[in-house]
Image (cartoon, rainbow, N blue to C red):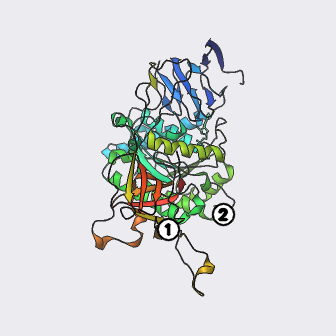
C-alpha cells in the first residue's frame, strides 16, 4: 500500500472500510476459489466505467482483478480480498478526455443525421460530413486494451443520450460473450458490470437465464476456433471482414445505433512486432480498419506501435497514444487457460458465486447479474446424436497420414481456408472433449451455395462432445439449451473442455 489517498478502518473480522480520496482507485486481485464483496457506503465510485449503486453489495470471483475508481471520493466496505492496494496514479483523466472527444463525434453525427445545423461548438470544424467514432484499440499484451474498451463503452452508455455503442471483440483468446475461440460484436445499452473474468464483457443472452435476459447482450459471433492468431491468419482476416459486413448491415436498419459508433478491442498479437505474427499483423490491422471503417486508433502505452500507426494511418484518421494503467495485471499463460475454462463452464452452467464468509446470503447483491437467491445456474442438456446427424467440419487442417504414406509423387495440398469434413468414426478425429460451434443454416437455395460458405456463416451456439461411441456410431454432446442438432452444421477448432 502506498499510504496516500485513503484511510482504512476495520469494521469486523471480515470487513474493512476504505475512505478513498478523489481520483484514486482501490485495486484488488482474487486467488482461485475466493470471492470478494464490495459495498459503496458513501460518495460515488465506478468499476471500469460502470457506476456502483449506493448500498448494493457487489460480488467478485474466479480470480477477478479489477479496481474501484472514484472521481469525487467515496467510502467502500470490503470483505476479504487476496491482494489489495490504493493508487492515486491512474490514467483515468486521459481516458475521460478520449471519451469526451468520442462523445463530440457522436453528437455531431447525430445532428447531421437529423439534419440539424451544426452548433457553435462545431464552428471551425472542417468536417462537412461528421462521422460517429469507430475506434480501434491496439496495444501489447497486458496493456489494458480490453479494460479501456470497456471504460469507453460504459462512459458512452452513461451519458444519458441513450447511445448503444457497438463493442467488438476480435481477440479469440478472450472469447468475450461467446466462448473462447469466437470473435463477436454486440450493441451495449447498459453499463457492463465487472464480476468475474468469465463474463468480462457482460453476460450474453445465451448464457443468462430467461428471467434475466433483459440485461443480457445479443452478440453476433463468428467461430475461429483457436486462441492464437498465427494458427490461421487468413481465416481470421475473413472472419473479421464478415463481422464488419454484418455490423454494417445491422446499422443499415439502425441509424441511431450507427451514430453511437463502435469500440473494437484487438488481440495483443496485433501489436507484437517480432516473431511469426509480425508478417500477418499488419494485414489483420488493415482488415479491422477496412471491415469496421475505423476512423480513430488508440494505442495503449506503446511508443513504437504508435509511430508505426501514425505513419500508416495518420494521414486518414486520428492516431492517439494513451497511457497504460499501472493497475493492469500481468496475466500469464496458465491464468489465461483457467479463464478459458471458467468461460466455458459459465457458458454451460452459468455462474453462482458464493458470498464470502460473514456476508448474509440475504444481502442485496449486484455485480453483474447474480443475486443471492437467484443463483445463475443453468441446466445444460446432454444428448445423444448419431454420427450422421451432425455435419462437422474442421477448417484448413487435415487429420493427416504422414506424407511418406502418400503415393509417390503425390502432394497433399490443403488450403488454410478449406472446410474439411471430420469423420467422428476415425480414430484420432479430435472430437472427444472438443468445443464445436454450431453455425447458422446455410443458404436454403442450393444454387447459391459455395465451397467456402461454412466460413461465412455466423456461429449461433456452442456444444462440447463429451463421449464418442464408435461401435454404435453416436456421440454425446453437452449444449446449453434444448433444440435438435439433427441436420446442423458444426465446426471444430482446437479448444477442448472437460468438467
Ligand atoms: N486499474 C486496474 N486495477 C486492477 N486491475 C486492472 C486494472 N486495469 C486492468 N486490470 C486487470 O488487468 C488484467 C489485464 O487487463 P486487460 O485484459 O484489459 O489487458 P489487455 O491488454 O486487454 O490484455 P491481453 O494481454 O489479453 O490483450 C485484467 O484482469 C484486468 O481486469
Residue 180 seen anywhere in this rendered image of the structure: yes
Residue lying furthest bottom:
409
Residue at 60 percent of width and 87 percent of height: 408
**Pointer 1: what residue?**
426
Q: Position of residue 398 (x, y in %)?
A: 53, 70
Q: Which residue is mark 2?
A: 276
The reply, left or right, for residue 495 in relation to residue 259 is right
Which element is circle 1 on? loop
**Neighbours of disc 1 within 10 Å: few (<14), some (14-19), many (20+):** few
Quarter of the image where ligand 1 sits: top right
Rendered residue at 44%/56% (across/down): 437
The residue tagged with tag 2: helix, strand or loop?
loop
Q: Is residue 209 above or below residue 259?
A: above
Q: Which of the two discs, 1 and 2, labels the residue nearer the N terminus?
A: 2
- Quarter residue 410 falls in: bottom right
For this orientation, the residue located farthest to the left is 445
Q: Residue at x 40, y 59 (%)?
A: 245
Q: In this orientation, which residue lies closer to the viewer: 109 or 18?
A: 18
Q: Quick check: can you spot residue 321? A: no
Tell me residue 228's x, y (percent): 59, 57
Residue 269 spot, x, y in % from top left: 61, 55
Q: How many neighbours does mark 2 have within 10 angstroms: few (below 14), some (14-19), or many (20 or more)? A: few
Residue 113 appears at what percent x and percent y?
33, 47
Give the quarter of the image for residue 402.
bottom right
Viewer-nearest of discs 1 and 2: 1
Report, in whole angstroms, how far the alpha carbon at label 1 lies from the one at label 2.
Answer: 32 Å
Of residues 94 and 189, the one drawn nearer to the viewer in this rendering: 189
Q: Quadrant of residue 84?
A: top right
Amino acid at each position: 500500500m502506498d499510504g496516500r489517498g485513503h484511510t482504512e478502518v476495520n469494521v469486523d473480522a471480515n470487513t474493512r472500510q476504505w475512505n478513498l480520496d478523489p481520483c484514486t482507485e482501490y485495486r484488488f486481485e482474487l486467488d482461485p476459489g475466493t470471492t470478494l464483496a464490495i459495498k459503496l457506503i458513501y460518495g460515488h465510485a465506478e468499476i471500469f466505467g460502470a457506476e456502483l449503486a449506493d448500498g448494493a453489495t457487489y460480488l467478485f470471483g474466479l480470480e477477478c482483478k479489477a479496481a474501484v475508481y472514484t472521481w469525487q471520493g467515496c467510502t467502500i466496505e470490503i470483505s476479504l480480498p487476496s491482494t489489495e492496494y490504493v493508487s492515486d496514479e491512474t490514467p483515468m483523466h486521459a481516458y475521460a478526455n478520449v471519451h469526451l472527444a468520442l462523445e463530440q463525434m457522436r453528437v455531431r453525427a447525430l445532428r447531421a443525421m437529423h439534419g440539424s445545423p451544426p452548433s457553435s461548438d462545431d464552428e471551425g470544424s472542417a468536417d462537412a460530413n461528421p462521422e460517429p467514432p469507430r475506434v480501434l484499440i491496439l496495444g501489447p499484451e497486458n496493456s489494458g486494451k480490453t479494460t479501456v474498451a470497456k471504460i469507453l463503452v460504459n462512459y458512452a452508455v452513461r451519458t444519458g443520450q441513450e447511445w448503444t455503442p457497438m463493442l467488438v471483440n476480435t481477440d479469440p483468446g478472450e472469447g468475450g460473450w461467446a466462448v473462447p475461440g469466437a470473435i463477436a460484436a454486440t450493441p451495449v445499452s447498459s453499463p457492463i458490470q465487472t464480476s468475474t473474468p468469465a463474463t468480462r464483457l457482460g453476460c450474453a443472452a445465451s448464457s443468462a437465464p430467461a428471467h434475466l435476459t433483459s440485461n443480457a447482450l445479443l452478440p453476433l459471433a463468428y467461430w475461429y476456433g483457436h486462441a492464437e492468431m498465427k494458427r490461421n491468419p487468413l481465416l481470421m482476416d475473413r472472419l473479421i471482414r464478415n463481422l464488419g459486413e454484418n455490423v454494417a448491415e445491422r446499422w443499415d436498419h439502425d441509424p441511431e445505433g450507427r451514430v453511437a459508433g463502435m469500440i473494437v478491442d484487438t488481440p495483443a498479437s496485433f501489436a507484437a512486432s517480432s516473431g511469426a505474427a509480425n508478417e500477418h499483423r499488419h494485414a489483420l490491422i488493415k482488415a479491422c480498419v477496412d471491415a469496421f471503417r475505423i476512423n480513430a486508433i488508440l494505442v495503449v502505452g506503446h511508443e513504437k506501435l504508435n509511430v508505426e500507426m501514425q505513419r500508416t494511418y495518420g494521414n486518414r484518421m486520428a492516431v492517439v497514444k494513451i497511457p497504460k494503467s499501472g493497475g493492469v495485471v500481468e496475466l500469464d499463460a496458465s491464468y489465461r487457460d483457467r479463464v478459458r475454462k471458467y468461460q466455458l463452464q459459465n457458458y454451460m452452467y452459468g455462474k453462482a458465486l458464493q458470498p464470502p464468509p460473514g456476508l448474509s446470503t440475504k444481502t442485496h447483491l449486484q455485480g453483474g447479474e447474480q443475486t443471492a437467491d437467484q443463483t445463475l445456474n443453468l441446466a445444460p442438456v446432454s444428448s445423444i446424436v448419431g454420427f450422421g446427424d451432425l455435419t462437422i467440419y474442421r477448417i484448413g487442417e487435415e487429420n493427416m497420414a504422414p506424407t511418406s504414406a502418400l503415393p509417390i509423387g503425390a502432394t497433399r495440398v490443403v488450403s488454410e481456408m478449406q472446410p474439411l469434413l471430420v469423420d467422428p468414426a476415425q480414430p484420432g478425429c479430435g472430437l472427444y472433449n472438443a468445443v464445436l460451434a454450431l453455425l447458422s443454416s446455410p443458404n436454403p437455395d442450393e444454387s447459391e451455395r459455395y465451397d467456402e460458405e461454412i466460413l461465412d456463416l455466423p456461429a449461433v451456439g456452442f456444444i462440447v462432445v463429451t463421449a464418442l461411441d464408435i461401435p454404435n456410431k453416436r456421440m454425446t454432446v453437452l449444449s446449453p439449451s434444448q433444440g435438435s442438432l439433427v441436420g446442423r452444421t458444426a465446426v471444430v477448432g482446437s479448444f477442448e473442455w472437460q468438467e
